[in-house]
Image: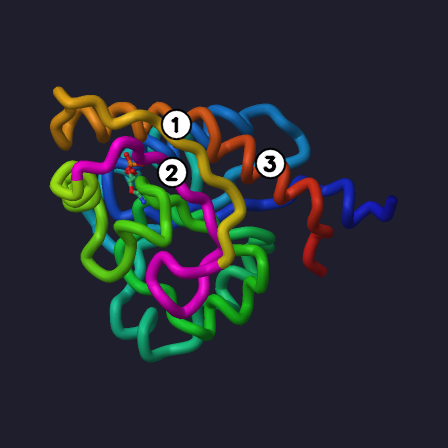
Amino acid sequence: MTNENRKPKRIAIFASGKGSNAQKIIDYFRGSGEIEVALIVSNKSDAGVLEIARKEAIPSLILDKHSFFQGDSYPDFLKEKEIDFIVLAGFLWKMPSSLIKSFPQRMVNIHPALLPKFGGKGMYGARVHEAVLAAKEKESGITIHYVDEIYDHGQIIFQTKCPVSPGDNPDSLAEKIHSLEYAWYPKTIEKLLQNIVKRS
Ligand code: GRF
């Protein structure tokens, strides 16, 4: 193994909201020595995830909308920061192709339902659970997938299910889904990272 490959692999987490998944991922890799959460990225200056970054002393970045969608500086910035892998955890902007192309098979998202059902533009947060309940589904779950140019569309890596009970409402379903996310997202990321080589 080269020295390069002994250096910890560096994750950037992109999130727009409170960041409870980001927190679980940070907790999971704390002290790992092989994998580290090196950067927190958000499109919202008041996102809870930035408070987590501050508390955890992890560098953070607030995206500029124009540069993100029209410019091409972020791929270089992430390269300079030696980011090996991007994790989306409740990130609501659509990833531009320049970033997707810079991280082939190195960018994953988690969706709080069983794709290909209940995904696509506008399907996030409580809306997903409301749609699942309205469709009288007997089960829901989580999907971890690679990111491509279409919302919630990239190759599926992992899914697991939970029952939808007759008494469930969007909040109770969200709670079940969050438990699945916390249990499976960090270890799925770990497995994927174990199979990639560090970028040079
Ligand atoms: C999660 O439910 C995830 O599936 C979705 O966005 C939500 C983020 O929640 N993509 P949190 O900010 O991690 O609490």
Whether label 2 touches label 1, CB < 8 Å = yes
In the image, residue 167 lies at what x, y percent?
Answer: 13, 20
Label 1: which secondary element: helix
In the image, residue 185 lies at what x, y percent?
Answer: 47, 35
Label 3: which secondary element: helix
Determine if the C-beta at disc 2 is less than 8 A from ligand 1: yes
The three-letter amino acid code for the residue at tag 3 is Glu
User: What number is the disc on residue 142?
Assistant: 2
Local packing at callout 1 (Cα closer than 10 Å; few below 14, some 14-19, many 20+) is some
Of residue 99 and residue 59, the one placed in the foreground of this image is 99
Local packing at callout 3 (Cα closer than 10 Å; few below 14, some 14-19, many 20+) is some
Q: Quadrant of the C terminus?
A: bottom right
Task: Give the residue drawn at x 55%, y 29%.
Answer: 29
Whether residue 150 is situated above or below residue 111 in the rendered picture: below
The three-letter amino acid code for the residue at tag 2 is Ile
The magenta stretch is: 136-154
Q: Is 193 part of what is drawn in magenta?
A: no
In screen coordinates, is 191 left or right of 41? Answer: right
Task: Give the residue drawn at x 16%, y 45%.
Answer: 131
